[in-house]
Image: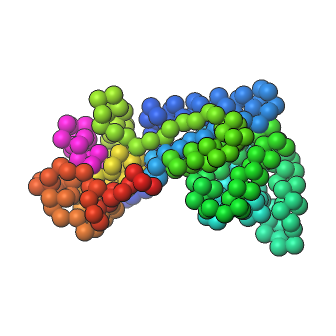
């Protein structure tokens, strides 16, 4: 296996972070809020909201990587803590999730009350030098309509009171409802970033084109132009402007080219990749990379992006 073949075999866009304009804007805002907490010694909040598949979690991982690259992370310290909020959140299981992320051996100890867990979280955050806590899937605090969810939201507020840490909430668009219902949280998370899908409006289509150009520049195989006018529409309709679907399609296309010894990525390869990664039941006229595609959005009944805007 030569070097080129090895590169194709291990290639994945998942190993690369594409610095799109909205990603740069979100990273800049996160850095600003983080620096403000460092400067003032006071806890600050940032809400990053947007649909599933736009790369909100990946954004935090890139921020962690950037801190490591500039040497901002000390040995033995956890500058950024990434925690996924449980689907049925209470202050006790949220504390347990944070303790698990902090690698506390007593994270799930049943004999420990919510108050004991809270005290352990505060202690470990301080001892480990955590400066940023990123809480993912925060919409669970909105969806789980029981007192436990409201208590969990208040628990976050209490944790901010006890620390000088930057807290980042990552969630779907409806996460905003949490701040609407809780005035104190709304005040603490007044900094907000809308991390939305790419659109093809006159103002924002250039960002999607820049993204496609950047992705094509990363590929280890020959390919048709991603930024030709019709191809831009095909990619947008195939992904609904969501970077997760876009990367899945292109990753799969690279693999198909490699394993079949093809000359490069052509429309039939992309059509097959779309079927494999997005919609296995698509017909030719509803496959965005088919020669007979009708160029209508895939939002009909049983289609991939049906009712997507509702979630």
| Direction bottom: furthest residue | 110
- The image shows a total of numbered marks equal to 0
Residue, x 77% and y 36% (percent of image)? 43
Please state if 286 lies on the left or on the right of 185 as rendered.
left
Colour theme: rainbow
Question: Where is the C terminus found, in terms of image quarters?
Answer: bottom left
Please state if 16 lies on the left or on the right of 190 as rendered.
left
Instruction: Using the rendered image of the protein, determine whether residue 278 is visible from the camera's viewpoint.
Output: yes
Instruction: Using the rendered image of the protein, determine whether residue 78 is visible from the camera's viewpoint.
Output: no
Look at the image and give the residue range highlighted in magenta: 220-237
Q: Position of residue 268 (x, y in %)?
A: 18, 57
Viewer-side residue, 224 vs 258: 224
Viewer-side residue, 10 vs 116: 116
Q: Is residue 19 above or below residue 262?
A: above
Which quadrant of the figure has residue 110?
bottom right
Q: Is residue 285 magenta?
A: no
| Direction left: furthest residue | 292
Residue, x 58% and y 47% (percent of image)? 177
Q: Is residue 231 magenta?
A: yes
Please state if 261 lies on the left or on the right of 117 as rendered.
left
Q: Position of residue 297 (x, y in %)?
A: 25, 51
Residue, x 23% and y 43% (percent of image)? 233
Question: Where is the N terminus found, in terms of image quarters?
Answer: bottom left
Which quadrant of the figure has residue 206?
top left
Residue, x 70% and y 37% (percent of image)? 188
Q: Position of residue 138 (x, y in %)?
A: 61, 53
Q: Position of residue 208 (x, y in %)?
A: 34, 37
């Amino acid at each position: 296996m030569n070097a080129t073949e090895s590169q194709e075999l291990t290639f994945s866009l998942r190993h690369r972070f594409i610095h799109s304009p909205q990603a740069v804007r979100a990273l800049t805002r996160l850095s600003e809020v983080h620096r403000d907490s460092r400067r003032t010694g006071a806890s600050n909040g940032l809400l990053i909201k947007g649909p599933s598949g736009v790369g909100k979690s990946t954004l935090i991982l890139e921020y962690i990587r950037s801190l490591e690259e500039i040497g901002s992370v000390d040995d033995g310290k956890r500058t950024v803590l990434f925690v996924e909020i449980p689907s049925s959140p209470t202050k006790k299981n949220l504390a347990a999730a944070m303790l698990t992320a902090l690698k506390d051996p007593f994270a799930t100890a049943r004999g420990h009350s919510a108050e004991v867990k809270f005290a352990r979280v505060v202690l470990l955050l301080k001892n480990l030098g955590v400066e940023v806590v990123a809480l993912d899937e925060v919409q669970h605090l909105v969806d789980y309509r029981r007192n436990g969810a409201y208590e969990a939201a208040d628990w976050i507020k209490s944790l901010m009171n006890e620390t000088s840490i930057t807290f980042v909430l990552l969630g779907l668009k409806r996460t905003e409802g949490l701040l609407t219902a809780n005035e104190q949280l709304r005040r603490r998370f007044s900094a907000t970033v809308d991390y939305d899908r790419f659109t093809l409006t006159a103002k924002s289509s250039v960002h999607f084109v820049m993204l496609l150009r950047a992705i094509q520049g990363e590929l280890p195989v020959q390919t048709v132009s991603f930024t030709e006018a019709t191809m831009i529409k095909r990619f947008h309709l195939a992904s609904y402007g969501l970077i997760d679907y876009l990367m899945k399609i292109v990753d799969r296309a690279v693999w198909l080219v490699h394993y079949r010894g093809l000359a490069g990525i052509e429309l039939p390869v992309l059509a097959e990749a779309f079927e494999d990664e997005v919609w296995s039941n698509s017909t030719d006229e509803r496959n965005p990379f088919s020669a007979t595609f009708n160029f209508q959005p895939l939002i009909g009944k049983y289609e991939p992006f049906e009712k997507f805007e509702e979630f």
